[in-house]
Image (spheres, rainbow, N blue to C red):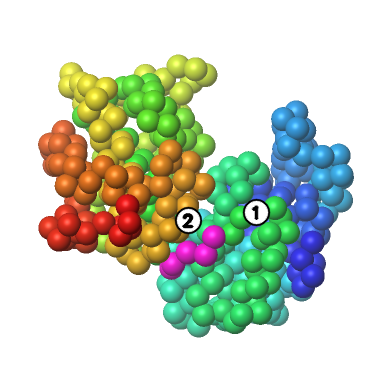
Amino acid sequence: MSDRIKSLGVVGLGVMGFDIAFLYASRGYETRAFDASKAAMDTIDARREQTVERLQKRQRLSAAEADNVRKLLLPATELAALAHTDLITEAVSEKASTKLAVYKSLRDAGFNGLLTTNTSSVTRATLTKNGVVNPANFALTHFFNPVLYTQMVEVVTGDMGADNRAAILSFLKSLDRDPVATQDISGFVSNGILMVYAVMACRLLECGAKIEQVDQAAKELKLLPPFVSFDSWKPSIVEDVTRIMRELRGDEFLRSSKLLARLAESNPRFYSGPNPNPKIYELTGAGNRSVTDAEVKLALQTSMLVAAARVAELGEAQPVVDRVGTEGIKMPQPPLRDIDSMGIVTLLDNLAEANRLLGVAPLPAPVSLVEMARTRVKFYSQS
């Protein structure tokens, strides 16, 4: 347990927020949980027991941790009940205005502890620019989904003081998590890569690919199967995250899938049991078109590598991009080293081929990548 942080609060009990609260309590921290939705509050006990049962069946939760959760995960009757905790994690929707409203309410209730947000896409600069939060006490802590099965946490501390920064990192380590300091870039490293990949997968369906064809290609490449993942992420969340990332980064490709916008309206699952959901194809607009397995593989792999290069272009350190790529989102090779190995010119040729398949709204090459190809520079000088 952290020496400085003893009591915690979590605001927002969606999939991520609830699991974060569960994690905190399981590690021995008194955790007060609040959601503005009465339905979310009414189901805390049931969700807790379902999660305990699921994790114990998979031998991922000890008896002591289960006891901790039952004793220490406490519903809060109102947001102000969290005001005297040492640290609060906000996990509400991906709207800066909603997050800022929560921060203002906490400030008005007298909260002056450490504040973190589990945002997937909003930058720290966006959330600190209007003075609602004290930057010295505020950090982004981006847990990976599913929270209870993944170890890495991307952390943006910005201009926090050294003591507060150390307290945040020590706390995350006390949860048996692996904090990785990242730059204040919308989407961090992980979503900077995964959201481009997710949009490319949707675009492939629009070109005539099949759901199982795309997922099988990803498995053969040792990448996350995108549509299996969508059934965990939900299209509406991907829609929100890509919208904000486009606004903050200017990457139009993130908003190029008409299918994603249609899916976000009702969040249909891509799979019904083991079988692909045939209703998805009614939304693709693909007609009788088809795509070869080789074309699918080329587009998926290229999108991830180009996305990694774009994150580096936005200012992230190359070793951090590669570490998050392999340890966080389980790419088979460090992406920037992979680019060096295959050759930037080859990657750009592959991108041109993938874009011919897409037709309109192509995935652009990062300007820095084109310049590196022209000057024959690599990401790592000794690659």
Q: Quadrant of residue 225?
A: top left
Tell me what residue is drawn at x 25 percent, y 33 percent: 298
What segment is highlighted magenta in the picture? 180-184
User: Disc 1, disc 2: CB below 8 Å?
Assistant: no
Q: Amino acid at mark 2?
A: Ser
Q: Is residue 361 left or right of residue 194?
A: left
Label drawn at residue 120: 2
Label drawn at residue 177: 1
Asked if the magenta segment contains residue 183, the reply would be: yes
Q: Quadrant of residue 245?
A: bottom left
Q: Amino acid at mark 1?
A: Arg
Asked if the magenta segment contains residue 62, the reply would be: no
Res 8 seen here: yes
Q: Quadrant of residue 148?
A: top right
Res 247 seen here: no
Q: Is residue 212 left or right of residue 284?
A: right
Label drawn at residue 340: none
Image coordinates for residue 259, horizontal then vertical, percent:
29, 36
Tell me what residue is drawn at x 43 percent, y 68 percent: 184
All told, the count of numbered labels is 2
Q: Is residue 28 above or below residue 138?
A: above
